[in-house]
Amino acid sequence: MGQSLVERLGKEPVRVHVVDDCVELIEHQVKAKGFMIKSAYATIKALKKRFVPEVVDTLLDDWLGKMQPHYDKWEATKPGAFSDYIIARSDDVAEDLLAVTDERAARSSHGTAKKMYQRMRDTAKKNVVEAIPDLARLIERRLAK
């Protein structure tokens, strides 16, 4: 078998571009949301300009690791485009990606952040499911280079 997604997309010089692509995807998704999400995102960026890119960079390997089994199953038969395969499994892929942040939240010693995450978890899943098509195309595009 070839290189893993972490080896192909999570290593320099590609990694920095994948992080930038993910931040752009997040910003595009935020623009389509309501006032509360937009203002929360603006506040986070105002408090710490590099917060979102740093979080994406920190979690990227774990997220790519969660995408790997889906990629392996697709690669075994290649029933069509990888993005189509992932989009058809959006709910499962979203759960796998959120398992990374679920684990981080569970380990957090910051009680308020933990409670806030738990309150927002269902909304987060809906938002991740909505972002799956763009995410799948982003991965597909980067793998083609």
Image (spheres, helix red, strand yellow):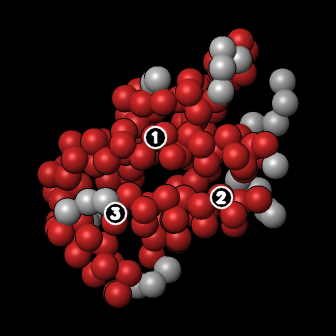
The nearer-to-camera label among 2 and 3 is 3
83 in relation to 109, above or below:
above
Q: Are marks 2 and 3 in contact (CB under 8 Å)?
A: no
**Element assignment for label 1:** helix
Question: Which residue is rendered at x = 65% and y = 58% of the image?
Answer: 18
Question: Which residue is rendered at x = 59% and y = 33% of the image?
Answer: 83
Determine which residue is flagged by label 2: 18
Q: What numbered label is drawn on residue 30?
A: 3
Residue 100 visible in image: yes
Quadrant where the N terminus is found in the figure: top right
Label 2 or label 3, whichever comes before in sequence order: 2
From the viewer's perspective, tell me whether residue 39 is left or right of residue 70: left
Question: Which residue is rendered at x = 32% and y = 53% of the image?
Answer: 105
Instruction: Give the distance between the C-alpha atoms of the residues marked 2 and 3, in whole angstroms.
Output: 18 Å
Say which amino acid is labelled 2.
Val
Task: Out of 113 and 69, give the one closest to the viewer.
Answer: 69
Dot 3: within a 10 Å radius of its alpha carbon, few (fewer than 14), some, or many (20 or more) residues?
A: some
Label 1 or label 3, whichever comes before in sequence order: 3
The location of residue 68, given as percent across then percent down, is 63, 32
Q: Quadrant of residue 37?
A: bottom left
Task: Out of 71 and 108, give the one closest to the viewer.
Answer: 71
Q: What numbered label is drawn on residue 132?
A: 1
Instruction: Give the distance between the C-alpha atoms of the residues marked 1 and 2, in whole angstroms.
Output: 15 Å
